[in-house]
Every structure is written in structure tokens, then in C-alpha cells.
Image (cartoon, rainbow, N blue to C red):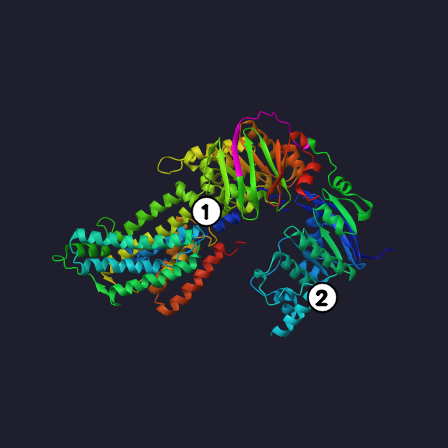
């Protein structure tokens, strides 16, 4: 029998009523680079968090070197030789490279005094071994490049005697040259016997580096294949392959004039010369990979990110938007992607959440709130959006994710905006609530609102949007009309295939 | 991945109701215990005394609460109180503003100085984005330093001759006495007006509503197009203004201005706000409970004085009771 370094068998994980992983198995050999692919939300990250001990599975077992491993917390994972490098690095920016690499040793050491000389020498040794002797152990992490931060993360993993190294979208922020360097390093580690699990959306990278590929879809295994036996498009169709048409309620399309337009928008390195327009009664999609610059584009329009260039036209007239305050006055509202941190006021009553943007409508001249008028306003919105609430005075935190999201939407409507930006409107809500939110968006465009929707879920983009711009590295790489909207096309424009 | 399926909570959760109103329970308990321990406690004189003594503290506590609700903190109110106190007395004596209108002008100057310092605090915190703890701590040193410079470190005594210094005398009389009908000190009446005003402001106006929202989640407020900075600025300005008023009341009560007055008052004000159930993380707190918080601290020290506990041990006990009160109230917050 083939000897596996890692076997995860029949892993099931539920969040509330949602099954994130159902009966998923993953087998990784000793000394191989194993790619894990799937759409956003397919369950890759959840699976890796279970491996790292950050989540507990509801069912299933993990074996490392044929020995059962109980991962109850991240420390168990580290002790078993599992290191996960997330997209957001877990480094301390204000201290040196050497301290970051040996943080565990420093913590566990019985000697409470640090031998700085030995620390620097040991770190330099690891860096030299990896071929990155140029990184100084004495630099502070905040002063080194992102590519080098990744190297520091890998050094940290090696200092923990890591046997299984997981990298989540490691090349998202790297240049081509840096990517090549990283690949050389990963191959070297593989040859030393480390098992690398490589998560990426970028098919060309997956194909150039991996030995085998496992595909996840909707929280289930699709298959594991040898990289040499398949083509890129075969893997892509394994990732997609489902019928979601029934998800998306039909709507009558009555598309009007251009109500919003942005021209030549640039902001730092994240938004590059982006132009698009939105018509009344239209859902305009911004698609692309996580980190491609979709949210940043919205934030730059709203003045949340500093703009280097760009003009905004509303109803054909140039409009200055320096801040969200200007945006609100100009009739542009945002549904932020992070509902709890940016969307709602969790501790405040539901009613206060709904009216905070439009208190002038429910108050007398001196700013005195008319309680009856406010309640009426709130209950009208509850009815319009079919929000399931106990009482308007209950805190927003008492609601389910989907209903919180509806409260957040009601906040946009109260402000009398004509242009609505939805950033990941269905993130973290269950399937039922998703469909309801789609219905709400359909109703709004039918009423003549212009909608811009950012989504990481391709079926959602295809099902909802009338036109879509695909963004990659802050640039629009293509604009697709309704009839060109296919997953293959979206993938083609959003990845460097 | 945060898929949550929280079942909506029962709105009338008994435990929560108890916790939310623990400030009221504590004050009722304290009143009962006090009246048993000391027969003097319920005398009119004692109660009016508490009112008069706590007038400045209540104003500072209201200001502290407005700032804390934005998730900020104002450590400078004790010092602002002192500079207002000194300015009023300095204007009256050094510029010979003995007439009623002169005294009135001096009062306005005292309050205005407080409001201006509050403006500076607010502007630095809101627009320069400096941490309020540091800004207002530094402002404490600056402001108290100025108070010492104005007075050369020595107290200024108000001239209160009823004939020669008509205005000064009226001012002092106002600080010392109460209305003839109920005997409630005039300073307390002023404070009651402020309490009602701010209670109304926080409960029934758009200003109060948005102030709470900005403290509850400033990112959400900003992204919704609310001018968060303006509200933060206003909170510090109001806090400074109220400290200015408190300084004037203290001048009237004592008839003397000292640059060292009011040190530590800001901490008592913050303690009162927290005892009143507000969260230092912002977004939570009410005027009513803040005032109750002031009374809780006041009653503890009052009853200890009445029962003859010496002043130094009083401080120890007071500190312990504050911790217990906050524990009852907010300690179980996640």
C-alpha cells in the first residue's frame, strides 16, 4: 500500500445549518506538491483550517504518518508538523525576522535570556539553506518585501520541523520572478520530503508546480488526479459543473439611461485606469479573484481610498465624491462586504440601524425624532424586504445573518440612493436567504435603481448580472455582455490562463 | 465563513433586565443601607448638601458619557474645570468686573475657555486621528499649567462685599444658597436643567442617535455616509463646555479660585459613567444611569463620612465598591 503522509478521511463540518464540508477526504503523499482547487466557498479554506486545528470537524479523522492525529487547536497542528501559511501573514511586523522565525522556540525555551548571536546565526542558516541569504535576520519584518515575508513564514514553518506545509494563494501578491523563486523553493522542500498542499486559483501555476490535484466543489470531493493526466479545462469543468439557473429568479429587463459612470479611476497599485458605467435598471457585475481590486475599486469611487485619477459622472454630470458623505449626498450607497464589522450596528436596535442614514425623514426640524413616524418607516421597510424580526427594538445581533444583511440593505434604501453598490451581498448567509437577497436586488433594479455587484461566486455573477467587467490586478481585463457570460469566460479573464 | 444561525433572543430576558438595571438596584440598596446606618442621612440639609457638592461632578459625568459613547475618553475635564474656575475669578478681580454685567461676562469667558479647550481636544482626536487618551492627558498638563501661570500658583479670592462688589456678591450668594421655595441649591437647578437637556438630546434627537451609532461601529457609520468626525468633535467640545460650566459653579460655591482644584474629578466622572453601565468600547450608555452612577459614588462617601469613617480608609473602601459596582454591571460582558 502506498504510504500517505496525510490522510483526512470523511471530514464533515457544518456551520449552523450550512454544510461547509460533507464527507470530504484528502490523501497527500510524502514529498509531493498537492494542489487543492475549487471555487470560492468550495470549502478549501475550511478543510485546511481543520487540518491546522483552527476548526474542529463534526465528523471524520485525520492521520499523519498513519497515526491518528487529534487536532483540537492550532498548537496540536504545529506539534504534528502542520504549518499553514494564510494569505494574511501571521508575522509580527515590529520585530526582527529572526524572532519571527523562532517565536515558538523563544516561547518554549527554559532559558529566559535570549542569545541574540545564536538566534541570528540559526536564522541565517535556514535562510541560506533556502537560497534566500539576502534576507537579513536583523531586519524588521515591516521593512522587508511581501515575497520575503512569505519566505520568513516558510522559515518559521521549517523551524517547527514542519512535515506538511499548506500555502493558501501564495502568489497572489508576488511578481512573476518572485513566483518562480518560490516555486524553486517549494520543489526543493518537496525533494527533502516535505508534503506541500498548494491552494490556488491560478491554473497555469497549479499545472506548472503540482504533482497531483484535488478538486473540491460545494464542500464535496470531486476527484484527485495526477497533474499529467488532465488538461486545464478539464480541471475547470470539474470545479464548476452544476446547475444553478433555478437559483436566480427571472426578471423583466428594462434597461434605461446611464446613471453612473466612472472614467480612468486609479488608486495606488490596487486600482488601475478602471472605467465603467451603469444604467438604470441594470445589474453591473465586477468579477475577479479575491484581491484583484474589486472592493478597492468601489472604495476608490466612494473616496475611502485615495484616488490618483478618475472622474465620476452621475446622470451625465461630473460629480465630486471625496468621501462617503459626498457619496451619500450624491445618491451612491454601499453594502459593505463585511456585514458585522462594516454593515450593521450589532448592539443597536434594528429600528435604529434602519433609520440611521435617513433620520431627517422621520424627525421634526430641530432634529427631534418623531417616534411614530420612525416606527412606521421601519415597519414599512421590514415588510418591503420581508425581514424576519422579533421586534424593531431588539438588537440587530438577535437576527440571523441573512436578516442582518437585509437590515444593512434597508439602510441603503432609507438614504434615497439611486446607485447601489453591493459588495459580496450574499457572503455568509444561507441558501434560502441568498435567494431572497437576489429577489430584493431584482426588485430594486425593476424600480429603476442602478446596481453594481461585486461577487466572488461566479454562478451569482452569471445569474444576476446584465453586464460584467472582470478585474485582474486592478485592471479591467474584459467586459462581458449577458450572452457572453459563462464561467469559462470569467475564468479566462480573471486568471492568467 | 461566518454562517450563523442565531435564534432570536427572547426580548424580556430576566437576567439581562436585571443586569441592565443594576445601577438602579445599587442606588436603591445604598439609600436603604444609608438610612439605616445614619439618622442624619435623610435630613434635608444632608440631601441638599449632596446635591450642591455633586453639581460639578454631574456635569463632568455627562460630558464623560458623551465622549465615552463615541469610544473615546476625556481625561482633561478636571483641568478644564480648574482653568475655567481661575479665569472667572481672574476676570472679576484683576479687571475689576465687579458689576453684575462684568461678572456675567467673566462667567461667559470661563465657560468659553472650557468649550475652546474641548474643541481643540476634539479637533486633534477627530481630524489628526490621535489617541484620545494621550491627547486629553497632554491637554490636562497644558491647561493646568496655564491655570498656574494665570494665578502664579496662589488662590484668587473673590471680593464679595454686598455694596462695593454687587456682582461678585450676587455670584457668591447664588453659589451658596437655594431657592426659597424648595431649598434646592441654585447650582443644582442649573445642573438639573442640563441633565434634562442632555437626556432629551440623547434619547429623542438625531444628534444623540447618530452619536451612539458612531460609537457602536464607526466603520459602519462612516461607510453609510455619516460624518463621524463631526460627531466625535462635538462630543469633546460638549465635554469641555460642561467642564467650563462646572468650573463656574465651583467658583460660585467656594468664592475662591485655585489652580489645583478638580484634580481627579475626571476619573470619578469616568467611574460614574462606567458604573452607570456604559461601555468603554463605545455605543452604550444613558444619561439617566450616568447620573445614578454619580450618586452611587457620592452616597458611598457621604454615608462613610456620616458614620465617622476617617477620610483615608474611605478612599480604599470607595475604590473597592466601584470595582464591585462595575463588576455587577459590565463585568460579564464578553
Whether residue B31 is visible to the viewer of this picture, yes or no, is no
Whether residue B16 is visible to the viewer of this picture, yes or no, is yes
- Closer to us: B299 or A182: A182
Tag 1's secondary structure? helix
Query: Would residue A257 be counted in the magenta stretch?
Result: yes
Residue ID for mark 1: B214
Residue A120: where, in percent of width, then height?
Answer: 63, 70
Q: Which residues are magenta?
A: A246-263
Given this view, does label 2 or label 1 mark the residue nearer the observer? 2
Residue ID for mark 2: A129
Residue A195: where, in percent of width, then height?
Answer: 76, 57
Instruction: Name which quarter of the figure residue A72 lies in.
Output: bottom right
Q: Are the residues flagged by discs 2 and 1 from a single subunit?
A: no
Q: Residue furthest left?
A: B163
Mark sitting on residue B42: none
- Closer to us: B48 or A44: A44
Tag 2's secondary structure? helix
| Mark 2 neighbour density, 10 Å: few (under 14) some (14–19) many (20 or more) | few
Q: Residue furthest front?
A: A177
| Mark 1 neighbour density, 10 Å: few (under 14) some (14–19) many (20 or more) | many
Query: Would residue B23 be counted in the magenta stretch?
Result: no
Are circles 2 and 1 on residues that touch, CB within 8 Å? Answer: no
Q: CA distance from mark 2 to mark 1?
A: 52 Å
Q: Quadrant of the C terminus of chain B?
A: bottom right
Q: Residue at x 67, y 29 (%)?
A: A483
Query: In the rendered view, would you say A361 is above or below B319?
Result: above
- Closer to us: A375 or A158: A158
Residue B294: where, in percent of width, then height?
Answer: 37, 55
Label 2: chain letter? A
Amino acid at each position: 500500500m502506498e504510504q500517505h503522509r496525510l490522510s483526512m478521511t470523511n471530514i464533515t463540518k457544518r456551520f449552523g445549518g450550512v454544510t461547509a464540508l460533507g464527507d470530504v477526504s484528502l490523501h497527500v503523499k510524502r514529498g509531493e506538491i498537492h494542489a487543492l482547487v475549487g471555487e470560492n466557498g468550495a470549502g478549501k479554506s475550511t478543510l485546511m483550517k481543520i487540518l491546522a486545528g483552527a476548526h474542529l470537524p463534526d465528523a471524520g479523522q485525520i492521520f499523519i504518518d498513519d497515526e491518528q492525529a487529534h487536532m483540537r487547536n492550532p498548537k496540536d497542528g504545529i506539534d504534528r508538523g502542520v504549518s499553514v501559511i494564510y494569505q494574511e501573514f501571521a508575522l509580527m511586523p515590529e520585530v526582527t525576522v529572526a524572532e519571527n522565525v523562532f517565536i515558538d522556540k523563544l516561547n518554549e525555551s527554559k532559558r529566559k535570556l535570549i542569545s541574540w548571536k545564536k538566534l541570528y546565526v540559526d536564522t541565517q542558516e535556514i535562510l541560506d539553506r533556502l537560497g534566500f541569504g539576502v534576507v537579513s535576520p536583523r531586519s524588521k519584518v515591516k521593512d522587508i518585501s511581501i515575497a520575503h515575508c512569505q519566505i520568513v513564514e516558510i522559515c518559521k514553518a521549517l523551524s517547527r520541523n514542519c512535515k506538511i506545509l499548506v500555502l493558501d494563494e501564495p502568489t497572489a501578491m508576488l511578481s512573476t520572478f518572485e513566483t518562480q523563486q518560490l516555486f524553486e523553493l517549494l520543489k526543493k522542500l518537496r525533494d527533502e520530503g516535505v508534503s506541500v498542499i498548494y491552494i490556488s486559483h491560478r491554473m497555469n501555476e497549479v499545472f506548472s508546480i503540482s504533482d497531483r490535484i484535488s478538486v473540491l466543489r460545494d464542500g464535496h470531493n470531486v476527484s484527485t488526479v495526477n497533474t499529467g493526466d488532465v488538461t486545464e479545462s478539464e480541471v475547470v469543468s470539474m470545479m464548476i459543473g452544476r446547475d444553478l439557473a433555478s437559483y436566480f429568479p427571472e426578471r423583466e429587463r428594462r434597461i434605461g439611461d446611464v446613471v453612473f459612470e466612472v472614467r480612468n479611476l486609479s488608486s495606488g497599485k490596487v486600482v488601475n485606469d478602471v472605467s465603467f458605467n451603469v444604467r438604470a435598471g441594470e445589474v453591473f457585475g465586477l468579477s475577479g479573484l479575491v484581491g484583484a481590486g474589486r472592493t478597492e475599486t468601489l472604495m476608490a469611487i466612494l473616496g475611502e481610498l485615495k484616488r490618483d485619477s478618475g472622474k465620476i459622472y452621475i446622470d451625465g454630470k461630473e460629480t465630486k465624491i471625496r468621501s462617503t458623505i459626498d457619496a451619500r449626498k450624491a445618491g451612491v450607497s454601499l453594502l459593505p462586504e463585511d456585514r458585522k464589522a462594516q454593515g450593521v450596528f450589532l448592539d443597536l436596535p434594528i429600528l435604529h440601524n434602519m433609520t440611521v442614514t435617513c433620520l431627517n425623514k422621520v424627525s421634526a426640524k430641530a432634529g427631534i425624532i418623531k417616534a411614530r413616524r420612525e416606527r412606521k418607516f421601519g415597519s414599512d421597510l421590514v415588510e418591503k424586504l420581508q425581514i424576519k424580526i422579533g421586534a424593531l427594538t431588539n438588537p440587530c445581533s438577535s437576527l440571523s445573518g441573512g436578516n442582518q444583511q437585509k437590515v444593512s440593505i434597508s439602510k441603503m434604501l432609507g438614504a434615497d440612493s439611486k446607485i447601489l453598490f453591493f459588495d459580496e451581498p450574499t457572503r455568509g448567509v444561507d441558501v434560502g436567504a441568498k435567494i431572497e437577497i437576489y429577489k430584493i436586488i431584482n426588485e430594486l433594479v425593476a424600480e429603476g435603481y442602478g446596481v453594481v455587484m461585486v461577487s466572488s461566486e461566479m454562478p451569482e455573477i452569471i445569474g444576476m448580472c446584465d453586464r460584467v467587467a472582470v478585474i485582474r490586478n486592478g485592471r479591467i481585463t474584459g467586459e462581458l455582455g449577458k450572452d457572453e457570460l459563462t464561467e469559462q469566460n470569467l475564468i479566462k479573464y480573471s486568471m492568467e490562463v | 465563513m461566518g454562517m450563523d444561525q442565531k435564534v432570536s433572543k427572547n426580548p424580556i430576558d430576566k437576567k439581562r433586565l436585571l443586569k441592565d438595571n443594576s445601577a438602579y438596584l445599587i442606588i436603591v440598596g445604598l439609600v436603604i443601607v444609608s438610612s439605616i446606618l445614619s439618622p442624619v442621612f435623610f435630613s434635608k440639609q444632608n440631601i441638599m448638601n449632596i446635591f450642591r457638592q455633586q453639581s460639578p461632578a454631574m456635569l463632568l459625568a455627562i460630558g464623560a458619557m458623551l465622549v465615552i459613547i463615541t469610544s473615546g475618553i476625556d481625561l482633561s475635564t478636571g483641568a478644564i474645570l480648574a482653568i475655567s474656575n481661575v479665569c472667572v475669578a481672574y476676570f472679576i478681580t484683576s479687571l475689576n468686573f465687579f458689576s453684575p454685567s462684568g461678572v456675567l461676562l467673566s462667567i461667559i469667558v470661563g465657560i468659553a475657555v472650557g468649550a475652546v479647550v474641548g474643541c481643540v481636544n476634539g479637533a486633534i482626536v477627530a481630524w489628526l486621528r490621535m489617541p484620545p487618551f494621550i491627547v486629553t492627558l497632554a491637554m490636562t498638563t497644558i491647561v493646568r499649567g496655564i491655570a498656574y501661570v494665570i494665578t502664579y500658583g496662589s488662590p484668587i479670592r473673590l471680593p464679595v462685599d454686598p455694596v462695593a462688589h454687587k456682582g461678585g456678591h450676587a455670584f457668591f450668594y447664588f453659589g451658596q444658597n437655594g431657592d426659597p421655595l424648595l431649598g434646592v441649591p441654585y447650582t443644582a437647578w442649573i445642573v438639573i436643567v442640563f441633565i434634562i437637556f442632555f437626556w432629551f438630546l440623547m434619547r429623542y434627537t438625531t444628534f444623540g442617535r447618530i452619536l451612539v451609532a458612531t460609537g457602536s461601529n464607526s466603520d459602519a457609520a462612516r461607510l453609510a455616509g455619516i460624518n463621524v468626525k463631526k460627531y466625535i468633535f462635538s462630543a469633546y467640545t460638549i465635554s469641555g463646555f460642561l467642564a467650563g460650566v462646572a468650573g463656574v459653579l465651583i467658583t460660585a460655591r467656594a468664592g475662591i479660585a485655585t489652580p489645583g482644584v478638580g484634580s481627579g474629578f475626571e476619573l470619578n466622572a469616568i467611574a460614574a459613567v462606567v458604573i452607570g453601565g456604559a461601555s468603554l468600547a463605545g455605543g452604550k450608555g444613558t444619561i439617566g444611569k450616568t447620573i445614578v452612577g454619580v450618586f452611587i459614588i457620592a452616597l458611598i462617601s457621604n454615608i462613610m463620612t456620616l458614620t465617622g469613617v476617617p477620610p483615608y480608609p474611605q478612599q480604599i473602601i470607595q475604590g473597592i465598591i466601584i470595582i464591585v459596582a462595575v463588576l455587577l454591571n459590565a463585568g460579564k460582558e464578553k
